Amino acid sequence: MTGYLTTHVLDAARGCPAAGLEIDLFRIDAETRIRLRGARTNSDGRTESPILPPDEFRPGTYELVFHAGAYLDSVGMPPQDPRFLDLVPVRFGMDSPVHYHVPLLFSPFGYSTYRGS
């Protein structure tokens, strides 16, 4: 079995998937962040394919950065200057070649995440 990473994003304030939200994936090597790719969520709040595909999986520390502020602006949430949540980083480790799923549930003033299935 080869490992891979998926994610999805739910907009708790509006009660729907966060469609069109930009996400960046980084690998962390020591203190260096290496950007691997960017993706945008579809109408179901998911990326079209794994954000880290099986052929690129390797154990280590990773970070997903969710562009929550830009998404909130795009869906017409009342603007703030600055927004309470703008970029939401989630740093996590993957040690085994299995499916990792890291979802984000957020609103303009809070978020939660977990290791999904």
Image: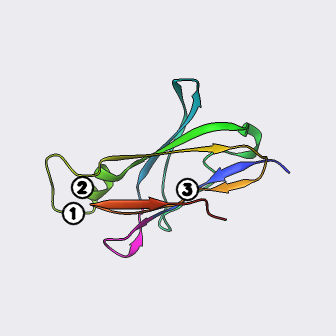
Image check: 4 left or right of 9? right
Q: How many marks?
A: 3
Circle 3 SS class: loop
Q: What amino acid is found at the position of numbered circle 3 in the picture?
A: Thr
Give the Cα distance between marks 1 and 2.
6 Å
Main SS, magenta residues? loop
What residue did someone put label 1 on? 77
Q: Residue at x 76, y 40 (%)?
A: 55
Query: In the rendered image, which quarter contains the C terminus?
Result: bottom right
Give how far across and how far down residue 28 sits, in percent: 57, 31
- Badge 3 crowding class, 10 Å Cα cut-off, few under 14, some 14 to 19, many 20 or more, is many
Q: Residue at x 28, y 58 (%)?
A: 72
What residue did someone put label 3 on? 47
What residue did someone put label 2 on? 73
Q: Which residues are magenta?
A: 10-19
Give the Cα distance between marks 1 and 3.
23 Å
- Name the residue nearer the viewer: 42 or 93: 93
- Residue 10 is marked as none
2 up-or-down from 77: above or below = above
Q: What amino acid is found at the position of numbered circle 2 in the picture?
A: Asp
- Badge 1 crowding class, 10 Å Cα cut-off, few under 14, some 14 to 19, many 20 or more, is few
Give how far across and how far down residue 116 sits, in percent: 62, 63
Disc 3 and disc 2 in contact, CB within 8 angstroms: no
Circle 2 SS class: helix
Disc 1 and disc 2 in contact, CB within 8 angstroms: yes
Give how far across and how far down residue 56 sits, in percent: 72, 37
Q: Residue at x 17, y 46 (%)?
A: 82
40 up-or-down from 107: above or below = above
49 up-or-down from 107: above or below = above
